[in-house]
Image (spheres, rainbow, N blue to C red):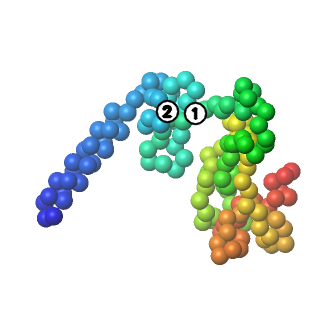
Protein backbone atom coordinates (compact mmCIF):
# COMPACT_ATOMS: atom_id res chain seq x y z
CA UNK A 1 0.00 0.00 0.00
CA UNK A 2 1.58 3.26 -1.06
CA UNK A 3 1.86 6.30 1.19
CA UNK A 4 -0.92 8.32 -0.49
CA UNK A 5 -3.39 5.43 -0.22
CA UNK A 6 -2.56 5.01 3.48
CA UNK A 7 -3.14 8.74 4.12
CA UNK A 8 -6.50 8.56 2.32
CA UNK A 9 -7.55 5.52 4.36
CA UNK A 10 -6.56 7.15 7.66
CA UNK A 11 -8.43 10.33 6.70
CA UNK A 12 -11.56 8.32 5.90
CA UNK A 13 -11.34 6.46 9.23
CA UNK A 14 -10.86 9.73 11.13
CA UNK A 15 -13.86 11.37 9.44
CA UNK A 16 -16.01 8.28 10.03
CA UNK A 17 -15.06 8.16 13.72
CA UNK A 18 -15.65 11.90 14.18
CA UNK A 19 -19.06 11.61 12.51
CA UNK A 20 -20.09 8.62 14.63
CA UNK A 21 -19.09 10.38 17.87
CA UNK A 22 -20.64 13.71 16.86
CA UNK A 23 -23.87 12.00 15.79
CA UNK A 24 -24.21 10.27 19.15
CA UNK A 25 -27.58 10.54 20.82
CA UNK A 26 -28.34 13.22 23.42
CA UNK A 27 -31.10 14.76 25.53
CA UNK A 28 -32.00 11.57 27.36
CA UNK A 29 -32.37 9.53 24.17
CA UNK A 30 -29.25 7.38 24.51
CA UNK A 31 -29.86 3.70 25.17
CA UNK A 32 -27.77 1.13 27.01
CA UNK A 33 -24.18 1.07 25.62
CA UNK A 34 -24.75 4.12 23.37
CA UNK A 35 -21.98 6.73 23.34
CA UNK A 36 -22.69 9.77 25.53
CA UNK A 37 -21.01 12.93 26.79
CA UNK A 38 -22.90 13.53 30.04
CA UNK A 39 -25.50 11.86 32.29
CA UNK A 40 -28.40 13.84 30.82
CA UNK A 41 -27.74 12.21 27.42
CA UNK A 42 -28.69 8.80 28.80
CA UNK A 43 -32.24 7.48 29.15
CA UNK A 44 -34.07 6.63 32.37
CA UNK A 45 -32.14 4.28 34.66
CA UNK A 46 -28.83 4.96 32.89
CA UNK A 47 -25.81 7.23 33.41
CA UNK A 48 -22.78 8.17 31.32
CA UNK A 49 -19.75 6.12 32.44
CA UNK A 50 -16.36 7.45 31.39
CA UNK A 51 -14.12 5.15 33.49
CA UNK A 52 -10.84 6.13 31.81
CA UNK A 53 -12.34 5.63 28.37
CA UNK A 54 -12.12 7.92 25.36
CA UNK A 55 -15.67 6.99 24.45
CA UNK A 56 -18.02 7.09 27.45
CA UNK A 57 -21.15 4.94 27.22
CA UNK A 58 -24.54 4.76 28.91
CA UNK A 59 -24.71 2.05 31.58
CA UNK A 60 -27.32 0.96 34.11
CA UNK A 61 -27.59 3.06 37.25
CA UNK A 62 -29.67 0.60 39.25
CA UNK A 63 -29.37 -3.06 40.09
CA UNK A 64 -31.70 -6.00 40.55
CA UNK A 65 -31.95 -7.37 44.07
CA UNK A 66 -31.58 -11.08 43.37
CA UNK A 67 -33.36 -11.97 46.61
CA UNK A 68 -36.54 -10.24 45.44
CA UNK A 69 -36.73 -12.34 42.30
CA UNK A 70 -39.50 -14.89 41.88
CA UNK A 71 -37.22 -17.89 42.50
CA UNK A 72 -34.99 -17.03 45.44
CA UNK A 73 -34.62 -20.58 46.73
CA UNK A 74 -31.39 -21.47 44.95
CA UNK A 75 -28.24 -22.35 46.92
CA UNK A 76 -25.86 -19.45 47.59
CA UNK A 77 -23.35 -20.65 44.98
CA UNK A 78 -25.94 -20.46 42.18
CA UNK A 79 -26.29 -16.67 42.35
CA UNK A 80 -24.09 -14.11 40.65
CA UNK A 81 -23.22 -10.99 42.64
CA UNK A 82 -22.13 -7.65 41.25
CA UNK A 83 -18.45 -7.49 42.19
CA UNK A 84 -15.87 -4.77 41.71
CA UNK A 85 -12.26 -5.69 40.93
CA UNK A 86 -9.70 -3.84 43.05
CA UNK A 87 -12.54 -2.01 44.77
CA UNK A 88 -10.07 0.21 46.62
CA UNK A 89 -8.32 1.49 43.47
CA UNK A 90 -10.37 4.69 43.26
CA UNK A 91 -9.62 7.34 40.66
CA UNK A 92 -8.40 10.58 42.22
CA UNK A 93 -7.44 9.10 45.59
CA UNK A 94 -4.19 10.64 46.86
CA UNK A 95 -1.11 8.53 47.53
CA UNK A 96 -0.55 7.65 51.19
CA UNK A 97 3.14 6.77 50.80
CA UNK A 98 4.62 10.08 49.68
CA UNK A 99 5.37 8.81 46.17
CA UNK A 100 3.16 9.05 43.11
CA UNK A 101 1.24 5.81 42.60
CA UNK A 102 2.07 3.87 39.43
CA UNK A 103 -1.00 1.64 39.43
CA UNK A 104 -4.23 1.44 37.50
CA UNK A 105 -7.25 3.07 39.13
CA UNK A 106 -10.17 0.72 38.46
CA UNK A 107 -13.03 2.54 40.19
CA UNK A 108 -14.64 5.98 39.93
CA UNK A 109 -16.80 5.48 43.06
CA UNK A 110 -15.80 5.15 46.70
CA UNK A 111 -16.45 1.77 48.33
CA UNK A 112 -19.55 3.23 50.02
CA UNK A 113 -20.85 4.49 46.66
CA UNK A 114 -20.12 1.09 45.10
CA UNK A 115 -22.20 -0.62 47.79
CA UNK A 116 -25.00 1.95 47.44
CA UNK A 117 -24.98 1.28 43.68
CA UNK A 118 -25.64 -2.44 44.18
CA UNK A 119 -22.16 -3.93 44.44
CA UNK A 120 -22.37 -6.92 46.79
CA UNK A 121 -18.81 -8.25 46.64
CA UNK A 122 -15.53 -6.35 46.92
CA UNK A 123 -12.24 -7.71 45.62
CA UNK A 124 -9.47 -6.38 47.86
CA UNK A 125 -5.78 -7.22 47.32
CA UNK A 126 -4.05 -7.21 50.71
CA UNK A 127 -0.29 -7.34 51.26
CA UNK A 128 2.15 -7.24 54.14
CA UNK A 129 3.92 -3.92 53.66
CA UNK A 130 5.93 -1.84 56.14
CA UNK A 131 4.91 -4.14 59.01
CA UNK A 132 1.18 -3.63 58.38
CA UNK A 133 -1.55 -4.82 56.03
CA UNK A 134 -2.12 -2.60 52.97
CA UNK A 135 -4.51 -2.54 50.03
CA UNK A 136 -2.07 -2.68 47.18
CA UNK A 137 -1.36 -3.69 43.60
CA UNK A 138 1.64 -5.93 43.45
CA UNK A 139 4.72 -5.81 41.30
CA UNK A 140 6.84 -8.94 41.28
CA UNK A 141 4.72 -10.45 44.05
CA UNK A 142 5.34 -7.59 46.49
CA UNK A 143 3.72 -4.33 47.49
CA UNK A 144 5.86 -1.23 46.93
CA UNK A 145 5.60 2.48 47.83
CA UNK A 146 4.54 3.22 44.26
CA UNK A 147 1.81 0.51 44.16
CA UNK A 148 0.36 0.85 47.69
CA UNK A 149 -3.07 2.44 48.11
CA UNK A 150 -3.94 2.55 51.80
CA UNK A 151 -3.08 0.91 55.12
CA UNK A 152 -5.99 -1.35 56.18
CA UNK A 153 -5.98 -0.07 59.77
CA UNK A 154 -6.23 3.50 58.49
CA UNK A 155 -9.05 2.71 56.05
CA UNK A 156 -11.17 0.86 58.61
CA UNK A 157 -11.48 3.87 60.94
Q: In the rendering, at what x and y percent does residue 12 appear?
A: 21, 48
Q: Nearer the viewer, residue 108 or 119?
A: 119
Q: Find residue 60 and name its label.
A: 1
**Toward which corner of the image does residue 66 lie, by quadrant?**
top right
Residue under label 2: 32
Is the C-beta separation of discs 2 and 1 under 8 Å? yes
Q: Nearer the viewer, residue 148 or 34?
A: 34
- Horizontal relation, residue 83 to residue 36: left or right: right
- Horizontal relation, residue 121 to residue 153: left or right: left
Point 67% across, 64% down: residue: 137
In the rendered view, would you say 11 is above or below 140?
above
Q: Is residue 99 visible?
A: no
In the rendered view, would you say 153 is above or below 109?
below
Q: Is residue 109 visible?
A: yes
Quadrant in which the N terminus appears = bottom left
Q: In the rendering, at what x and y percent does residue 97 appear?
A: 72, 66
Point 53% across, 40% down: residue: 49
Amino acid sequence: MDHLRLVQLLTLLTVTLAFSVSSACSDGKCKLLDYCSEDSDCGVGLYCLSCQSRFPICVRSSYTDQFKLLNNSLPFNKYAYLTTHNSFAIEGEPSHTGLPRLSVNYQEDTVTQQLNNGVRALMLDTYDYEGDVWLCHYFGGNCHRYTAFVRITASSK
